[in-house]
Image (cartoon, coloured by chain):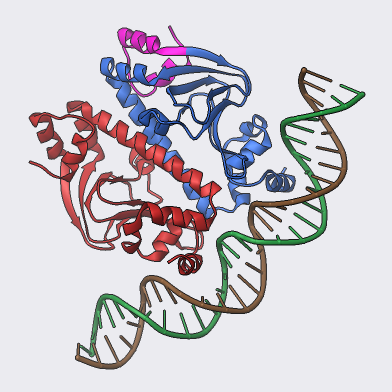
Chain colours: A red, B blue, C green, D brown
Amino acid sequence: MDHTLLNHVRKFVELNEDETQILDGCLRFKKLKRKEYVLRIGEICRGNYFVAKGCLRKFYLNENGTEQTIQFAIENWWITDFMSMEKEAPSEFFIQAVESSEVFFLSHESQEQLFAKVPKMERYFRIILQKSYAALQQRNKYIFSLSKEKFYKQFSDGFPGFLQRVPQYMLASYLGMTPEYLSELRSKFP
Amino acid sequence: MDHTLLNHVRKFVELNEDETQILDGCLRFKKLKRKEYVLRIGEICRGNYFVAKGCLRKFYLNENGTEQTIQFAIENWWITDFMSMEKEAPSEFFIQAVESSEVFFLSHESQEQLFAKVPKMERYFRIILQKSYAALQQRNKYIFSLSKEKFYKQFSDGFPGFLQRVPQYMLASYLGMTPEYLSELRSKFP
DNA sequence: CGCGACGTTGATTTGCCTCAACGATTGTGG
DNA sequence: CCACAATCGTTGAGGCAAATCAACGTCGCG
């Protein structure tokens, strides 16, 4: 037994054969088509998604009704709506496959059972969350201190291949600007 | 034995007498004067701070040399620079007491030992981080979709008492605007 | 008292948005 | 396999939110 998620977990904690079995038993593999949703606004988020292949995004609709992307998740990233999952409250977000993707679903209940049976997994998620939190705060730092132009360059330098994978309007909203303005910037920096 | 931090931990996990003892033994209580630093740019961040009383903030200097606050931590919040702590790399941030404060310091090593002895604490931090991450993402949502005016109102409604506790220039940078503009907004909404 | 830190106010400038029109590309049904 | 409609990216004109810059008032503190 061996797949992307297990490899990822093994980077942070060591699991024996039994524990690996248990973890694997908690997961549900799922293929997603392009534009397929795993969460819609108003629904309750039931668990976490680990991206083994492809790309998912989380977005919401602002007051003008335009999509605002607040997170991309590519290979080896988790994506979920913690708010909704924790409180079992209707989500304010959509989670959607940007391209055809393969994910592992870990439901909230499975996750709790997993923690009870394999405490090391609590450590794994603690570490992942710590990294995610640090990354998000770093992102905030850039948002405030960089002009849109520099923010875009920063991003395109940091994830060069990624630009080709997502439509520009998604990227624009993720970077907090209009598609028109992103277009203008791109023409300046090929 | 009983103090703010222990009470906070007990909200999320149950500790017996021994475990409480161990946790307490890992902490170092510290009083901070107004404007006192616990981390400066270039230093390596050695651990986590829990605010029992008062208020701390994390900020950096942008290219113009002006302070940019990216986090406030009031009572019952943790503050640290994960990036620096994890990698043992020089920090890009300052962490400073906004007002005279009382904190518990949990060093990185103590934390690891604590996790080894009291695995439940790994759970505690996982939960805290999950909440913090969700809150930060919510904040990002507001940053992008609200005008500065609404962002300010949103904040002042959300933390009414807090406005009096911090100088306006700190608040302005936290909200991503200039002190001048914040002043203008405040005169409009008393 | 006098200095430095902080807040305010106003004039001017600009980064970025809005709106509208126009290509290019894709996909879909006849 | 083409026609036609969506969907997406581009370009340009005009407008506004918010920044910049400078000057001044005020408070607290050594």
Q: Is residue B71 left or right of residue A124?
A: right
Residue B7 seen in render = no
| Camera-side residue of B89 and B163 | B89
State whether residue C23 is above or below residue B156.
below
State whether residue A131 is above or below residue A64.
above
Q: Is residue C1 left or right of residue A125?
A: right
At a point 28% along the width and 55% down the height, the residue shown is A55
Q: Quadrant of residue B129?
A: top left
Q: Quadrant of residue A172?
A: bottom left
Residue B144 seen in render = yes
Give how far across and how far down residue B37 sits, in percent: 56, 23
Give how far across and how far down residue B83 sits, in percent: 40, 34
State whether residue B55 is above or below residue A174.
above
Q: Which residues are magenta?
A: B1-28
| Camera-side residue of A155 and B110 | A155
At a point 47% along the width and 32% down the height, the residue shown is B91
At a point 55% along the width and 53% down the height, the residue shown is B146
Q: Quadrant of the C terminus of chain B?
A: top right
Q: Is residue A71 magenta?
A: no
| Camera-side residue of D6 and A87 | D6
Q: Quadrant of the N terminus of chain B?
A: top left
At a point 49% along the width and 67% down the height, the residue shown is A188
Q: Is residue B112 left or right of residue B70?
A: left
Q: Is residue D20 left or right of residue A93?
A: right
Give the dominant element type of the magenta stretch: helix, strand or loop.
Answer: helix
